[in-house]
Image (tube, rainbow, N blue to C red):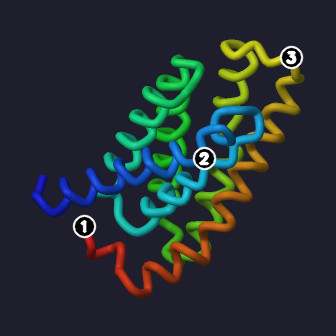
């Protein structure tokens, strides 16, 4: 791995952690509003961002989550969602459309987090309600991120940055 790739991934991991820490009270409940989920859109531009995102999720869940099993479930959710988007990206080349698909993929897969919250955090809410609220929070966060990441890409060229 090139030094540039390593440094950029370390920066993404650090940024993911810090941004998650800033919104931690809203990032680990059945209403998940993690602004750090913006970084999930980087996978649309280049597969090399995969490890930076994964390490960021790992660190955030390890050090900030009140439910430590979140390390396993959060990583599983992120890895599956990123791999799905990377696979879909083989056929969908429009960046804006792929970010929209990425938003749907991450939001739909929130059933993994909903299951974890229901079983391990012992929330007294229906699984379907937890899935709905976590999925909506994820979707809104990632939807808000699309124009921001899209315009940042115009300036920074994420595809060639790493």
Q: Quadrant of the C terminus?
A: bottom left
Q: Would you say 10 lies left or right of 40 here?
A: left
Q: Where, by quadrant of the figure, is residue 11 drawn?
A: bottom left
Mark 1 lies on a secondary structure that is loop
Q: Earlier in the sequence, mark 3 or mark 2?
A: 2
Query: Which of 107/123 is in front?
Result: 123
Q: Residues within 10 Å of mark 2 (few under 14, many from 20)?
A: some
* Residue in view at x 58 percent, y 67 percent: 99
Q: Earlier in the sequence, mark 2 or mark 1?
A: 2
Tag in front: 1 or 3:
3
Residue 124, labelled with which disc? 3
Mark 2 lies on a secondary structure that is loop
In the rendered image, the vertical position of residue 147 relative to residue 52, given as above or below? below
Query: Which of 94/155 is in front?
Result: 155
Residue under numbered circle 1: 162
In the rendered image, the vertical position of residue 4 relative to residue 20, given as above or below? below
Mark 3 → mark 2, Cα distance in angstroms:
23 Å
């Amino acid at each position: 791995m090139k030094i540039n790739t390593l440094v950029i991934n370390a920066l993404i991991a650090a940024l993911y952690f810090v941004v998650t820490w800033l919104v931690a009270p809203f990032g680990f409940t059945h209403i998940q509003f993690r602004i750090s989920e913006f970084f999930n859109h980087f996978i649309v531009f280049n597969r090399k961002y995969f490890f930076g995102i994964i390490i960021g999720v790992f660190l955030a869940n390890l050090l900030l989550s009140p439910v430590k099993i979140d390390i396993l479930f959060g990583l599983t959710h992120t890895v599956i969602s990123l791999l799905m988007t990377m696979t879909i990206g083989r056929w969908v080349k429009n960046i804006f459309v792929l970010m929209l698909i990425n938003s749907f993929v991450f939001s739909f897969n929130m059933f993994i987090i909903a299951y974890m919250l229901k079983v391990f955090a012992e929330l007294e809410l229906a699984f379907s309600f937890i899935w709905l609220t976590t999925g909506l929070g994820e979707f809104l966060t990632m939807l808000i991120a699309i124009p921001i990441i899209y315009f940042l890409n115009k300036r920074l060229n994420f595809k060639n940055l790493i």
